[in-house]
Image: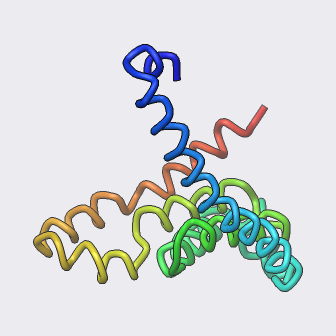
Amino acid sequence: AFIAWMLSPAILKGGVKGGTVDFMRLLPRLVIGVIGSGFIAEVMPQALIAQWLGPGSGIVGTAIAALAGALTPGGPMIGFAIGVAALKSGASAPQVIAYSTAWALFAIHRVFLWELQMMPPKAVWLRVVASLPLPFLAAWTAMLVGKP
């Protein structure tokens, strides 16, 4: 803000206006996402989530979380709301990290609707294959960092 003001008060004014507009557009989505995650958490079968994605689920739980992340359609308000709901329902942090990482990297709908439409298929599939270990590495790193 200081640099923008030093360059020109008009730049500062434009930045404040643009930031305010973006904030006002995002705020309702945040509210809906946070409230929605509470509803999703109440509906999720907690015993099943804890069994399949809980601390004892290991590599199988990580694989299930990664697959679920890849298959989750929608934007961050959907993906992160489901991740938060899973945490509230008994999923462990490494599995939710694997879910979020896979959602960000492999969301199938984005691969087919955007990437394959704009890039050569070989480049898209090379990116997907090169990224396959990342949800597992992210979960493993979380397990290492999370231990005392």
Q: Quadrant of the C terminus?
A: top right
Query: Does residue 5 lie above or below 57 as drawn?
Result: above
Q: Does the image show residue 56?
A: no
Could you tell me residue 103's position as x and y percent? 50, 67
Q: Does the image show residue 62?
A: yes
Indicate how the structure is coloured in the image: rainbow
Could you tell me residue 38's position as x and y percent? 85, 72
Q: Quadrant of residue 31?
A: bottom right
Query: Does residue 122 lie above or below 40 as drawn?
Result: above
Give the mark count: 0
Determine the residue located farthest toward the front in the rendered image: 10
Q: In screen coordinates, is 16 left or right of 27?
A: left
Pick the front one: 84 or 140: 84
Q: Quadrant of residue 118?
A: bottom left
The residue at the point 25 percent across, 62 percent down is: 127
The residue at the point 22 percent across, 71 percent down is: 125
Could you tell me residue 33's position as x and y percent? 71, 69
The residue at the point 14 percent across, 75 percent down is: 121
Query: Does residue 6 lie above or below 81 as drawn?
Result: above
Pick the front one: 108 or 67: 108
